[in-house]
Image (tube, rainbow, N blue to C red):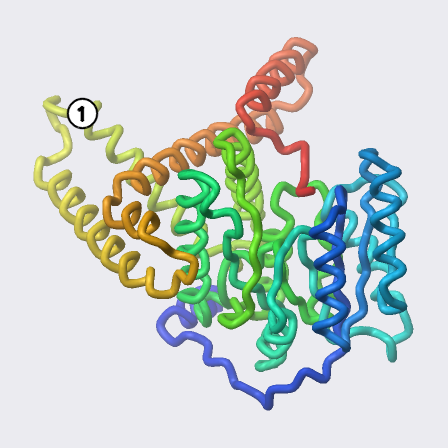
Amino acid sequence: MFIKSIFGSFFAPHKFQVKRKTTKHRVAVIVPSFQPGKLTFSLVQKLLVWNKNVTLYVVDDSTPHEYEVKHRVFARIRALSSRVTVLRTPENKMKAGAINHALFYILNQKKSLLPDAVITLDDDVIISKNTIKNLVINLFEDDSLGAVCSQCRVINKNKNFLTRLQGLEYLGFNGARLADEGFFRGPLVMHGMLTAFRTKALQEVGLFTEHHLIEDYEITARIKNKGWHVRLAPNAYAWTEVPEKFSNLWRQRTRWMVGGLFVVTDIHYWHAAIQDIVGHVFFISTFLFVIASFILRGSPGSIPRAIPIVIIVLSLTQALLWYLFQIWFMRFYREKDWKDWLIRLVLIPEFIYANVLAIVLLGSYVFFIFQAVFSWIGKKSKAVTRIKVLIEKIFSWIGYTKGWGTR
């Protein structure tokens, strides 16, 4: 049954049964906020003006930062409309805790007042007039859909060379989500930037997991594990800012990759994370093969010369096909200019960028193994505990930790 459910959707992708499009659904929008500003206020204003059938829940996550400034912004937001409710968490539990605080409030209302969908989004996201409407329409097009996310676009992609690379990368993220539609119940992650959930799906899986490194991947896996499908809404656009400094990008990606490993290795989520599992298996296998080729080169009983040649030819063929596809896919990149075309055509910058991310992934494997080993050893002695603390400090210094969640 397991094999059929996984590979059945590969050879015969799920076909969504498009129902009559309607916007007559009750929608609750949750905006968790730890440092609200002009973008937050503007976002709430636009959500109210452009979507007359939504109720908004803006959540102060109790971050001890510039309390007076935050208080004034939340007061202005509260005064915008009776459809806005400002909540405050009893203590700071990061983004997932703030969302859960609002969800608990929403889902404990009378059944007649429950929304049909719950939308979560970051407080600095920029949306278009039809973003929310199109998300909701896509979500209710098929009864099997449990969540639908927006297309991610980069608002600051022209800031510097690094943000341009991320802009091209996010284009690839959108492409991958579109390609995954119908396969293995849909894309891996309904991103935290802006996603619409069917209320019934949230009720089945429960609340977000708090203090998880990437709570959006984790809840997507649980939703898919319950039998729901997820997808990207091709006509719902949202813009976000990406890290402008390499140090911030590094910390973001270590969090993504380490958090992803913790999702994948949870036995309950294998079905929901099969694409990620296959990716890790191929990456590790290729990496180990390359290492083995160097170690055994020229020694008796070494790997036959034909095998590395075949691997190289297959890799180059795959790279060429990927390159041609990326060039073709640029037609969907609305924000592109000649500099983006140059980066894509030259290929070298993206090649270097991809290898840096590969280093981040290798470091994630090492950190994950370290966590697994010391979890197995347990608290054997004070000396072992001291060693663990020391190594954790070193990992934390270079960006690897499991002790924080998403803001």
Whether residue 205 sits left or right of residue 169 in the image: it is: right
Whether residue 301 sits left or right of residue 77 in the image: it is: left
Residue 388 to residue 328: above or below: above
At 82% from the left and 57% from the top, the residue drawn is 102
Circle 1 crowding by C-alpha within 10 Å: few under 14, some 14–19, many from 20: few
At 46% from the left and 76% from the top, the residue drawn is 14
Residue 185 to residue 273: above or below: below
Q: On the image, numbered disc 1 is attached to which residue?
A: 296
Whether residue 348 sits left or right of residue 12 in the image: it is: left
> Viewer-proximal residue, 97 or 247?
247
User: Which quadrant: the C terminus?
Assistant: top right
* Number of numbered discs visible in the structure rendering: 1
Task: Measuring from the top left, give residue 194's x and y in whole percent.
Answer: 62, 59
> Viewer-proximal residue, 199 or 302?
199
> Viewer-proximal residue, 87 or 114?
87
Residue 341 to residue 298: above or below: below
At 88% from the left and 58% from the top, the residue drawn is 78
Residue 135 to residue 271: above or below: below
At 10% from the left and 36% from the top, the residue drawn is 304
Task: Measuring from the top left, give residue 383's x and y in whole percent.
Answer: 65, 9
In the rendered image, the residue lying farthest to the top is: 383
Task: Measuring from the top left, give residue 353's x and y in whole percent.
Answer: 36, 38
Identity of the amino acid at label 1? Leu
Q: Secondary structure at mark 1?
A: helix
* Quadrant position of residue 309: top left
Whether residue 137 sits left or right of residue 293 in the image: it is: right
Task: Measuring from the top left, give residue 200's x and y in whole percent.
Answer: 72, 72
